[in-house]
Image (tube, grey):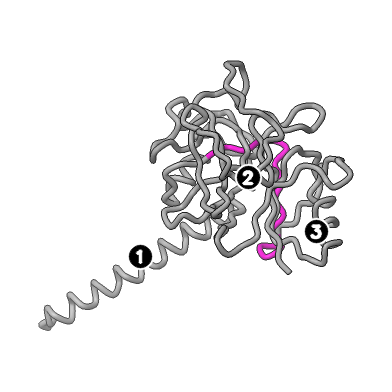
Amino acid sequence: MKINNQKLFFSIIVLLAIAGISAFSLVKNNDENRFVTYIVNPKKQDLKLYWKNKNQQNFGSILNLKNWVESKNKKLIFAMNGGMYQKDGSPQGLYIQNHKTLAELDTKNASGNFYLKPNGVFFISDQNNPEICTTENFKPSKSLKYATQSGPMLIIDGKIHADFKEGSSNLNIRNGVGILPDNSIVFAMSKEQINFYDFANYFKSLGCKNALYLDGLVSRTYLPEKKWTQTDGNFGVIIGVSSQ
C-alpha cells in the first residue's frame, strides 16, 4: 500500500507538536512541584518591603504582617522573607525602606552564605523599576525606594555563580529573587531541599540575567492563589504584595 508522502510528513509534524506540548507540560508541572513561584509587575502591583510596624516592633512573622495589612482594609496576596538578619531581627546589610536607609551596605569579607562573594542587592526605584546587582556594583541613590542586601548572587550577567557545584550535597530549603527579561520580578522558594546550583539554574531557566539568594532553612512563603500559606517565622525583612 502506498503512503502519501505529504500526509506522512503532516502526521509526523502533528506527532512532534503533541510531544512538544506534553514535554512542556511535564517540565512545567515538575517546576510547580519543586518551587513556589510568584511573578510581580512592580509597575502595576503594590510591592513593599517591611521590617517594623508603627510601634517600631519587628513584624517578625508573615502572620503579623498579614494581620497588619488587613487592619488597613487591604488583602495580603503574597509574602516572603526578604533577606538575612541579625539576632535582634535587624537586617544584615543594606536595607532601604521608603527612601530611608535603615541599615548600611555591608562590604566586609567573612564566612557564611551572605559573604559568599559576589553577594548583591535587590532594589526598586521610585519609578518602580526593579534591579539586582552585585554589592561591588551597587551605587547609592536618593531615587531608591526599597533595597535589601543578601548573598550570594545566584545569577550574575546570565551566568550561575562560579562557586556553585553541580551535584553538590549542600541541600536546604532556599528562596530568592530574580529579574525577568520583561523587567518583572520573580520570587521563588524551593518546596524541598535543593543545592545552590540547581536553585540558581531554575532562575536561569526562567530567563533571569541576575538573581539573588535571600535565605535558606528559615524560608517561608505566603501565596494563597497556589494554596501555599505559610504564616509563621521570625524574620527581619519581609517582602509583601497587597491589594485593596
The residue at the point 58 percent across, 54 percent down is 37
Look at label 1 and name its amino acid: Gly
* Residue closest to the far front: 142
* Mark number, residue 130: none
* Mark number, residue 69: 3
Which SS class for mark 2?
A: strand
* Residue corresponding to mark 2: 146
Is 215 within the magenta?
A: yes
Q: Is residue 206 above or below residue 72?
A: above
The residue at the point 53 percent across, 60 percent down is 29
Crowding around mark 3 (Cα neighbors within 10 Å: few <14, some 14 to 19, many 20+) is some
Q: Which residues are magenta?
A: 212-227
Q: CA distance from mark 1 to mark 3?
A: 43 Å
| Depth check, front residue: 33 or 11 | 33
Look at label 2 and name its amino acid: Tyr
Between disc 3 and disc 2, whose residue precedes?
3
Left or right: 68, with 110 as reference point = right
